[in-house]
Image: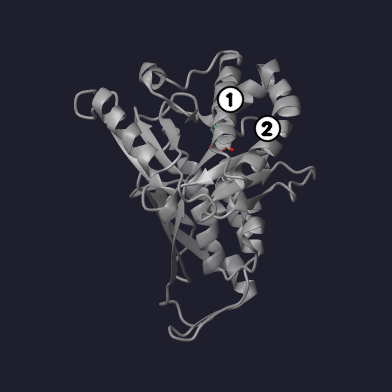
Amino acid sequence: MAEKSWVRMVTAQTPTNIAVIKYWGKRDETLILPVNDSISVTLDPAHLCTTTTVAVSPSFDQDRMWLNGKEISLSGGRYQNCLREIRAQACDVEDEEKGIKIAKKDWENLHVHVASYNNFPTAAGLASSAAGFACLVFALAKLMNAKEDNSELSAIARQGSGSACRSLFGGFVKWIMGKAEDGSDSLAVQLVDEKHWDELVIIIAVVSSRQKETSSTTGMRDSVDTSLLLQHRAKEVVPKRIKQMEEAIKNRDFGSFAQLTCADSNQFHAVCLDTCPPIFYMNDTSHRQVAYTFDAGPNAVLIAHNRKAATQLLQKLLFYFPPSSDADLNSYVIGDKSIL
Ligand code: 2P0
């Protein structure tokens, strides 16, 4: 390695994803292994994404991270697991332009600094951890010249936050729950890319950007411990639904797609109600929306068939819930899959 003055930096941008067949419940809390497969659609990075810059320098004496400009601790197990796993994959780096040479074995003693920004509310049920951990792992992989493909990286991002594994790909993505005890086969695969169904338009009606009261981690732990409906859902319902959803996506069958998406959102919230103590992710405004799918927060994710349908829907939403006159409804975020 050369002298102490150099810094190597990489910046990456990763969009969030919205599940249409939901992940809810872990069979292993440390490795973050789910009780069922899930399927999501990755949003347009222009609207909901995390931008992360990672830097390495021999002058850094510890790993540090800033989220939206505020320093956060990296001591938690999830960050530590991601950092350890990605360091294990680090390779030689040679940047001739800057005169930087890092040997594989040097990575053990080098520290990283991470600066990450979300362009949307953090932890309001808009999957900020999904974009965040996916982006962190992807950026570190580039920084450290790791050779893993996106599916292999997804298995590392999964250990930061389950839903993060699905943000390593655009288009429609499946997180395969896997069978292995070490979690090596619990990873994401792309079902179809963003061009396959590019007329779909996703509208997110932000009814609250406040931090949610029950974190997904705590909520799903309580559901696994107490909800019988969750057991039934994971074993009987989701496996069939995954097959039907894959078929609907492949055939661009909007009727089946919408029916499955709504049914799965409803069942996910039914599991939350079946949990002891019950979890309420939707508020009164959410119930007044014409909703397609709700995540672990009150915001409605509406998926329109095409631009024309989206325009009509947005006109109605703006008429009935104008952002300025309803304090509980702040804004609409429009994700146009066609420009993913
Ligand atoms: C999903 N959600 O499939 C489901 C639907 C929320 C409702 O994945 O504990 O933040 O970090 O693995 O990934 C949110 O859970 O939870 C989530 P952890 P995560 O998108």
Please, is residue 150 above or below residue 197 in the view? below
Q: Residue furthest right?
A: 180
Q: Secondary structure at mark 1?
A: helix
Asked which quadrant contains residue 102, the reply is bottom right
Asked which quadrant contains residue 23, the reply is top right
Disc assigned to residue 241? 2
Marker count (numbered): 2
Name the residue rendered at 41%, 50% in the picture.
49
Percent from the top left, x then y, of residue 176? 70, 44
Residue on which the image places disc 1: 263
Q: Is mark 1 within 8 Å of ligand 1?
A: no
Disc assigned to residue 78? none
* Circle 1: residue type: Ala
Q: Are marks 1 and 2 in contact (CB under 8 Å)?
A: yes
Please, is residue 142 above or below residue 164 in the view? below
* Circle 2: residue type: Arg
Q: Secondary structure at mark 2?
A: helix
Q: Where ligand 1 lies, by quadrant? A: top right
Horizontal side of 97 relative to 274 (left or right) equals left
Name the residue rendered at 47%, 48% in the picture.
132
Foreground pick, 186 / 160? 186
- The colouring scheme, among rainbow, by chain, secondary structure or one colour, is one colour
Percent from the top left, x then y, of residue 160? 57, 46
Foreground pick, 250 / 84? 250
The answer, for residue 276, to whether it is visible in the render is yes
Asked which quadrant contains residue 331, the reply is top left
Please, is residue 281 above or below residue 97 in the view? above
Q: Earlier in the sequence, mark 1 or mark 2?
A: 2
Name the residue rendered at 56%, 13% in the picture.
277
Query: Label 1 vs label 2: CA separation?
Result: 10 Å
